């Protein structure tokens, strides 16, 4: 597995400012700050910001005590650390989670690229966990972005306006009242249950509030005809899980958003009957959104077209160096050498030097 190409992944400009921060600009450093090498997907940050092997990933970051007086540092840490740039002298991890699952059909905004849609690649598309348990429940009082981003994140990557992955790409065309197939790829189970909801939004430039989804809960229908609003995770094996959803009979839309929510059940808490148990109380939550169209009954829906991703041609470059106007930046040559081979590097930062 490789990390995202530099066309979709970049790094902050120098050290964090010492005043109130604007929205962070992710560019390679222009100062003498050492550039960290990208880690493979299974190399992640531990609670002390050190690398660790395994499926554990950090879900929430905060500034180290000496940096907390700086305005905007909390947002700086959460934005940059999630992209792989996380100096331990600035930020530490305060919450971790395993890899979990992703919505494959209809493909979510973060996973559409896996189905060859020309959308930005979210290599962490199984981790829409609302910022992690601590951030969701201790900071945001249980609230979560509609598509799995932290509720308090100013620009949410998976929401419009402004989100990198909220492109408005219609990934499926359905007919009102249709029973549709859905597929969930399970990478780790944490008990709990799945639900699906729908919002007829009809505006790819601006996403709706959660209340729109709450008005249109969707029902599952099993092979034996059983209808339910929840699917419990325990009996489901790892891999691709398939089921069917019933669309509302009275909803049509040029853009509807299907929302998948996974409420886990692996935390101990207070139960409603006064006892305590596993799965009771606040739980970690995951979400993903897919943009679809629902056509009137009797109308033949347009076929969902997928533009094939461009094929890589020629011999892959094996030796990258810093672009001419960046060769004076300390550490840039080493950064290009470590991070570019095997992926497409933007010529703005690095160029191939193969003979």
Image: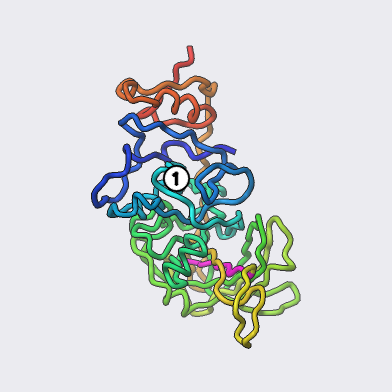
Residue at point 44% right, 30% down? Answer: 345
Residue 10 horizontal/vertical position (percent): 40, 39
Please identify the residue farthest to the bottom as the structure is shown: 273
Residue 78 vs residue 179: left or right?
Answer: left
Residue 342 vs residue 277: left or right?
Answer: left
- Residue 261: say if magenta: yes
Residue placed most toward the observer, 299 or 84: 84
Residue 205: image quadrant is: bottom left
Please identify the residue farthest to the front as the structure is shown: 66
Mark 1 secondary-structure assignment: loop
What residue span does the magenta drawing correspond to? 257-265
Instruction: Give the vertical position of 218 relative to 349 (above or below).
Output: below
Instruction: Give the vertical position of 133 relative to 36 (above or below).
Output: below
Residue at point 61% right, 57% down? Answer: 100
Residue at point 56% right, 51% down? Answer: 57
Residue 76 horizontal/vertical position (percent): 35, 50
Residue 242: image quadrant is: bottom right
Q: Which residue is label 1 attached to? A: 83
In this orientation, does residue 158 appear? yes
Please, what is the dominant secondary structure of the magenta stretch?
Answer: strand
Crowding near the residue tagged with mark 1, few <14, some 14–19, many ≥20 C-alpha atoms within 10 Å: some
The quadrant the N terminus occupies is top right
- Residue 326: say if magenta: no
Residue 193 horizontal/vertical position (percent): 63, 71
Instruction: Give the vertical position of 25 relative to 348 (above or below).
Output: below
Residue at point 40% right, 60% down? Answer: 159
Residue placed most toward the observer, 175 or 62: 62
Residue placed most toward the observer, 210 or 174: 210
């Amino acid at each position: 597995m490789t990390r995202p190409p530099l066309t979709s992944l970049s790094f902050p400009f120098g050290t964090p400012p010492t005043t109130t921060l604007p929205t962070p600009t992710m560019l390679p450093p222009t100062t003498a700050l050492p550039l960290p090498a990208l880690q493979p997907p299974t190399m992640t940050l531990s609670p002390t910001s050190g690398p660790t092997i395994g499926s554990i990933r950090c879900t929430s970051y905060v500034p180290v005590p000496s940096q907390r007086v700086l305005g905007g540092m909390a947002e700086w840490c959460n934005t940059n650390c999630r992209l792989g740039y996380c100096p331990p002298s600035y930020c530490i991890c305060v919450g971790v989670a395993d890899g979990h699952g992703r919505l494959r059909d209809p493909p979510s905004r973060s996973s559409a690229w896996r189905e060859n849609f020309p959308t930005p690649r979210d290599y962490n598309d199984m981790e829409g966990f609302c910022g992690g348990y601590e951030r969701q429940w201790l900071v945001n009082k249980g609230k979560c972005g509609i598509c799995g981003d932290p509720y308090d994140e100013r620009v949410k990557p998976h929401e419009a306006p402004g989100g990198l992955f909220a492109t408005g790409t219609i990934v499926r065309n359905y007919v009102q009242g249709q029973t549709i197939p859905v597929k969930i790829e399970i990478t780790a189970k944490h008990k709990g249950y799945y639900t699906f909801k729908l919002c007829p939004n009809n505006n790819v430039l601006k996403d709706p509030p959660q209340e729109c989804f709450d008005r249109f809960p969707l029902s599952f229908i099993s092979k034996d005809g059983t209808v339910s609003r929840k699917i419990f995770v325990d009996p489901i094996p790892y891999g691709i899980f398939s089921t069917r959803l019933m669309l509302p009979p009275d909803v049509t839309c040029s853009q509807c958003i299907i929302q998948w929510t996974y409420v886990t059940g692996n935390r101990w808490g207070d139960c409603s009957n006064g006892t305590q148990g596993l799965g009771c109380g606040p739980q970690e939550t995951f979400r993903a959104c897919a943009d679809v169209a629902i056509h009137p009954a009797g109308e033949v829906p347009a076929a969902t077209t997928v533009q094939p991703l461009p094929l890589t041609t020629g011999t892959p470059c094996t030796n990258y160096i810093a672009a001419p106007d960046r060769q004076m930046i300390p550490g840039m040559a080493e950064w290009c050498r470590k991070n570019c081979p095997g992926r497409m590097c933007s010529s703005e930062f690095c160029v191939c030097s193969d003979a």
